[in-house]
Image (cartoon, rainbow, N blue to C red):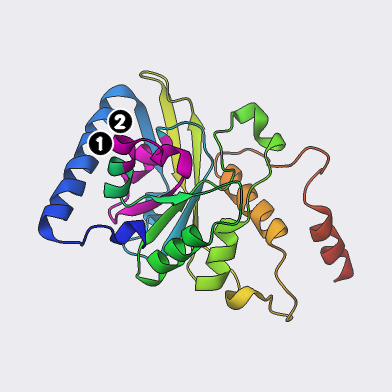
Amino acid sequence: MNPADAMPDNEPYRKTRAFLRGLCWVLVRLLFRVRYEGTEHIPAAGPAILVANHTSMIDMFAIHIRVRPWIHWVAKKELFRYRLPAALFRLAGCIPVDRSRVDLSAARSIIGSLRQGRLVGMFPQGTRVKSDEISQVKPRGGAVHFAAKTGAPLIPIAISGSFKLFHRVRIVFGEPYRLPAGGSALDGEALDFDQLSFQMMQKIYGLIGQTYHLDGQADEPAAGRRARHKR
């Protein structure tokens, strides 16, 4: 079952989620000084995949309160270990994923949510990453894989700053973009998901003026450089 469908979208359900959103809004606004930019790129409806760098557990809440459609966040299964947190995450429509293996159940839930016109939120780096550690964490290919498979646009979001009490935080929404549907490039060759994931992270960090690279790779994965030199 898709966790997003665990409870029908009836009136009490919407009211509960509206309460959760309002509570998050109050807490984020009271405790942090958040500035939003690029709000013209916020989608009015799905399907779409929101992809962001991950700095804190507060990231998803700070993004969520500014986006009108409900976001179904992909979250590590460890957060669902205990009964009360698991109930809250499922109420919020979060999708648990096992990061240690290929999780077909999570994949079906993500694709199902997108095909039902929903927003899915993902942190491609898979873990919280400090600004001075971004070159050490390779992004996972899930976001670009699901974007190519479903045709849903990717919406890059960059978070700059520290979610410490009353600190300034900047959240920038980037322009949506699409990948070739069906898993093939325009020339018929299979898509290079490592390269596409790398380019996605470049778009994300570029929104806040940071240059993204991986240790040992000056600008892009080797496969991407070879493909470019062939053209």
Tell me the residue at 55%/72% (across/down). Answer: 149
**Residue farthest to the left, as pictured:** 11
Q: Is residue 101 left or right of residue 32?
A: right
Q: Is residue 161 above or below residue 13?
A: above
Q: Is residue 78 above or below residue 130?
A: below
Tell whether position 3 is magenta: no
The residue where tag 1 is placed is: 25
Tell me the residue at 68%/44% (across/down). Answer: 138
The amino acid on which the numbered mark 1 sits, given as a three-letter code, is Trp
Binning the other alpha carbons within 10 Å of mark 2 as few (below 14), some (14 to 19) or many (20 upward) gives many
Residue 34: x percent and y percent? 37, 31
> Secondary structure beneath disc 1?
helix
Residue span colored magenta: 59-86
Tell me the residue at 56%/37% (across/down). Answer: 127
Q: Quadrant of residue 53?
A: top right
Tell me the residue at 41%/21% (across/down). Answer: 167
- Of residues 228 and 2, which is closer to you in this image? 2
> Secondary structure beneath disc 2?
helix
The residue where tag 2 is placed is: 28
- Of residues 39 and 227, which is closer to you in this image? 227
